[in-house]
Image (cartoon, rainbow, N blue to C red):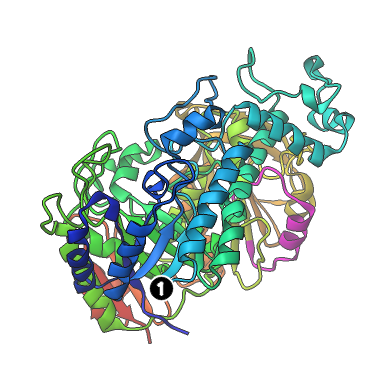
Amino acid sequence: MGRQPELGVCYYPEHWPEVMWEQDAADMVKAGITHVRVGEFAWSRFEPEPGTYDFDWLAQAIKTLGDAGLKLILGTPTATPPKWLVDKMPDMLPISRQGRTRGFGSRRHYCFSHMGYRRECARITRAMAERFGDHPAVVAWQTDNEYGCHNTTHSYTPAAKANFQTWLANRYGTIGALNEAWGNVFWSMEYLSFDEIELPNQAVTETNPAHRWDYRRFASDEVKAFNKVQTDILRELSPGRDLVHNFMTFVTEYDHFSVSEDLDVASWDSYPIGSLDVMPFVHENKEHFVRTGDPDIQAYHHDLYRACGRGRFWIMEQQPGPVNWAPYNPDHLPGMQRLWGWEAFAHGAELVSYFRWRQAPFAQEQFHAGLNRPDGEPDRALHEVTQLGSELKQLGDIEPASQADVAIVYSYDSHWALLTQPQGQNFSYIVQTLSIYRALREKGLNVDFISPDGALDGYKMVVLPSQIHVSDALTARLTAFDGDLIVLPRSGSRTVSHEIPANLAPGPLSELLGVKVTRAESFREFAAVDVDYRSKLYTFDRWREYVEGDAETVAHTSDGHPAITRKMNAYYIAGWPDDALLKDFLDVRAAAAGLPTLDLPFGVRTRTRGSYRVFVNYNPQTVSIADCVSGDLVLGSLDLAGADVAIERLA
């Protein structure tokens, strides 16, 4: 059943005189905004002194906004514990990997493992939910804010150490089992008890990779446990409201699939221009897309978080103009607010919310633009948002995003394994998955992400990036899959405890793929290995494996070794393919699978949702999409201007 996508905004009534609230609410409604997020940083105003609550101002703000017809998303304020609380429990502060305490004066200054702080979070959450949980204007709650931001997932406090020891005891049962699993006989690292185990930082040289991998798993579980403290209270006291958290761009230190199990909606904070500037692996795009953002990073996260949210995702913060936190902070091209919004809705977003209503005249985010300037006058983004809202009403209800033909299996655990033991400095799970995603998107294909526990039914092609540990359950699903299966290097190269499998990589996938990896090497770009695929030369430019087995050779290296192999419907790529090889190989497999592809112009992307196909032009200049459109356009033109959108109604 279809629904009309909606618009929202982040609002901070505590930053502005109460006499401004009513006009702000009226202006929001006029712009087509329906949802407002409030409260997520206001603990010092909710509880100015220990045990003394002041929710009256928030109640008035909710009344003012609600009376205007706006729906409220209340944020729990636990990302910003007040100074009096830090002074009361100074050991709640996080400690860096280098052993330095990260103090008060900004935000996210807490350790997820500190049980006293968790109790304080439960207390303030319960107080808020008791006051506002049944308010008719409150439709959703956001827990905390941006878990993991500022590198805060990992903390090396005494609380984290104690919780890690307990986590290990629960996982392994006996210290002997842990010693065996970790291979602690190496370098005399054997322990006599779980109490002896330290956190894996500040050793003389590298710590045991099994130790570090388990620490990353533990840290992820701590985020989940921290979040669940709040969701349990909110489900009890505010039933029927959506529970949400706002995830981020390429923050991967915890498993978002796991945390989302306790949420109704996965949301994320989209900052295309800022993200482009800080991401080191998209440097070739930075000049061309400097004022539009990379054409795939936003969509990548839309599809990833739609998967985490089991089909439901929002944008909780959409960049409205220059931000304050990147090394350089250019403005976006006129039209990009509208484009980013339409793109999110094309990928299935229910809500796009903008950060923030009015630019702050004080404190750390003074340079962060809003929909309105600090003097209260509308900024350029507000006009684009108003236009977007009008267009949404004209289009009406849109069907939910349906299952794509292609799925990428996304594993946070594999990402952590590669961070733990990269072996090649430039071997990045994020770069690999983005490269796969980009190659598929450049051909106009809808793409789903699925977790390693996800079902494969209904897909025609499944791509398995470097899945370091392959469980028995995943092996069974991959073996039963009857579409094209494409497996990337290093898959199955470690057991769950980071051992090399007895039968070597790809471990449990060896029979399915018909190969055994006998040797692997990493190298710098200048040592790339030539690959011959369909009589055309490409390269492996970061990683190369030597394989043997009964699989057919589909492509070979210049020195005569298999580069891509095939056994029935299962393909193995025995190295890091350059972008051209990856794209051409996926093109061939998509055609063989009968997938409908498009030859999109450079910088143009498309996504189908229901009976509509949305085209977005990330280029600053006009391009023609005439060769890609077969139906009627309900919005836009075949000569698609820079930073513009066209929508095709499909037959």
Horizontal side of residue 206 vs 628, given as left or right? right
Determine crowd level at label 1: few under 14, some 14-19, many 20+ residues with C-alpha closer than 10 A. Answer: many
Q: Nearer the viewer, residue 377 or 317?
A: 377
Query: Which residue is depicted at the point 66% across and 55% down?
Result: 452
Magenta extent: 465-484
Query: Which residue is depicted at the point 80% across and 41% down?
Result: 170
From this viewpoint, which residue is outermost toward the front?
A: 52
Q: Amino acid at mark 1?
A: Thr
Q: Position of residue 7 (x, y in %)?
A: 31, 68
Horizontal side of residue 600 vs 529, given as left or right? left
User: What is the total number of numbered labels drawn onto the structure image?
Assistant: 1
Name the residue tied to disc 1.
Answer: 608
- Does 244 appear above or below 188? below
From this viewpoint, which residue is outermost toward the bottom?
A: 651
Horizontal side of residue 564 vs 196, given as left or right? left
Q: Position of residue 331 (x, y in %)?
A: 19, 47
Query: Is residue 260 located in the magenta-colored stretch of the structure?
Result: no
Q: Position of residue 283 (x, y in %)?
A: 33, 38
On the rendered image, what quadrant is the C terminus found in?
bottom left
* Image quarter of residue 301: bottom left
Q: Nearer the viewer, residue 442 or 147?
A: 147
